[in-house]
Amino acid sequence: MKSPFSYVSFGKQNGLAWYGVKFLYLTFPKTGLVEDWEPLLLESDNGVTDYMLCELAVRLCSEKLRDVISQNLGPNDAVQWLPVTVSAKGSSFDYYIMHFPNPVDCLDMERSIIVNGDDVARPVFQSWMPGDHRIFTYLGAKNLPWYVVPNVKKVFRKEECTGLTYEPVLMASSLE
């Protein structure tokens, strides 16, 4: 069975450096909104794309990508946008970390590969997914994975959103 949605990952990337702190990984609550956010300043040596790879292991989106995502959320999707400034080649750009306050409990835990207690090495989605979701992540996904249905992927391509690549996902029904 062909997967009804895709994993979104970083395409060819311009790496970002984060200045002013000693750790390189942000953690967010597994569910719920991020409270008391302080906007960050990031610097890129190589310019910008709409979806950026970042040392912080976060989903970093341009204002354009933020708007496209916001306009294409499904009825059960929710995203919190955390502002970030990216400085590149002498210019500053508004970017946003995409946080999912309501990740979907949709993994087939018997077929997914879990390592180190709770890290999902290979997610396998329950057969009912994506349901009413169009842009989402799964419960316990940490900061990076996110998924889109084919219609949203088409919109990203039509709007020429840069920095994105897509990979198929595993569905429980395809493993039966």
Image (tube, helix red, strand yellow):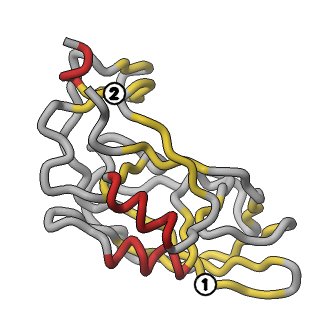
Could you tell me the amino acid type at mark 1? Asp
Between 20 and 122, the residue placed more toward the observer is 122
Rendered position, 130 above or below 86: above
- At a point 76% along the width and 57% down the height, the residue shown is 15
Q: Quadrant of residue 160?
A: bottom right
Q: Which circle marks residue 94 in the picture?
A: 1
Between 30 and 68, the residue placed more toward the observer is 68
Percent x, y for residue 75? 14, 67
Between 1 and 96, the residue placed more toward the observer is 1
The answer to whether the residue labelled 1 contacts the one labelled 2, judged by CB atoms less than 8 Å apart, is no
Considering the numbered disc 1 on the image, is that residue within a helix, a strand or a loop? Answer: strand
Between 70 and 158, the residue placed more toward the observer is 158
- At a point 14% along the width and 56% down the height, the residue shown is 132
Q: Quadrant of residue 6?
A: top left
Could you tell me the amino acid type at mark 2? Leu
Estimate how packed mark 2 is, as few (under 14), some (14 to 19) or many (20 or more) residues with alpha carbons within 10 Å. Answer: many
How far apart in space, not on screen, are marks 1 and 2 (Cα)?
A: 34 Å
